Amino acid sequence: MNDSDTRGNQRTPSDDSSTASPTHATDLTAFQRDLLALLTEDADYGLGLKDHLESYYGEDINHGRLYHNLDQLVERELVEKVALDKRTNEYRPTAEGRAIVRNRAQWLLAKLDLEPATPEAADD
């Protein structure tokens, strides 16, 4: 079996006993991939993630959207949720979550290297 799909994401052999966690970045929404990317930089709590995403997107992020997506990443075992106190949780990517971000970044970088820098370069 090939170890990567046409999108450059790593594939692992299927196992009927495996959990429902995704193997590929394409199994996630763009919002979930952005959350994972932020978390690979540093573990964070929900409101910290919200602030980073609002700055990046240039718009308000709904609390429900944020926490629903974080919960989905936790359920898929891509993110660990650790209680800091009764009101605050910290979110940390798992090794699988980090691998998804790494593989996606490598795929994107490979695509950038294949494209000509300018339209004139394509004519050479």
Image: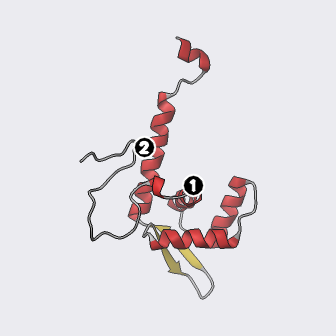
Residue 35 percent location from the top left of the image: 57, 61
* Corner quadrant of residue 17: bottom left
Q: In the displayed structure, does residue 75 sit left or right of residue 87?
A: left
Q: Position of residue 33 (x, y in %)?
A: 53, 57
| Among the two numbered marks 2 and 1 on one chain, the one whose residue lies closer to the N terminus | 2
**Circle 2 Cα neighbour tier, 10 Å, few/some/many (<14 / 14–19 / ≥20):** some
The residue at the point 33 percent across, 46 percent down is 4
Q: Alpha-carbon distance for marks 2 and 1?
A: 15 Å
What colouring method underlies this structural image? Answer: secondary structure
Disc 2 marks a residue whose amino acid type is: Arg
Instruction: Find disc 1 in the rendering and name its residue.
Output: 30
Q: Is residue 52 left or right of residue 121?
A: right
Residue identifier under label 2: 7
Element assignment for label 2? loop
Looking at this view, is 90 or 19 the one in front? 19
Residue drawn at x 48%, y 39% is: 109
* Residue displayed at 46% across by 48% down: 104
Residue 121: image x %, image y %? 55, 16
Above or below, comparing residue 42 to residue 87 in the picture? above
Which residue is outermost to the bottom? 86
Query: Could you tell me the amino acid type at mark 1?
Result: Ala
Q: Residue at x 43, y 55 (%)?
A: 100
- Image position, residue 92 (x, y; %): 49, 69
Residue 61 in sight: yes
Q: Residues within 10 Å of mark 1 (few under 14, many from 20)?
A: few
Q: Residue furthest front?
A: 16
2 relative position to 56: left or right: left
Q: Secondary structure at mark 1?
A: helix
Q: Would residue 45 be visible to someone looking at this image?
A: no
Q: Using residue 28 as the reference point, say whether residue 62 is left or right of it.
A: right
Q: Nearer the viewer, residue 67 or 52?
A: 67
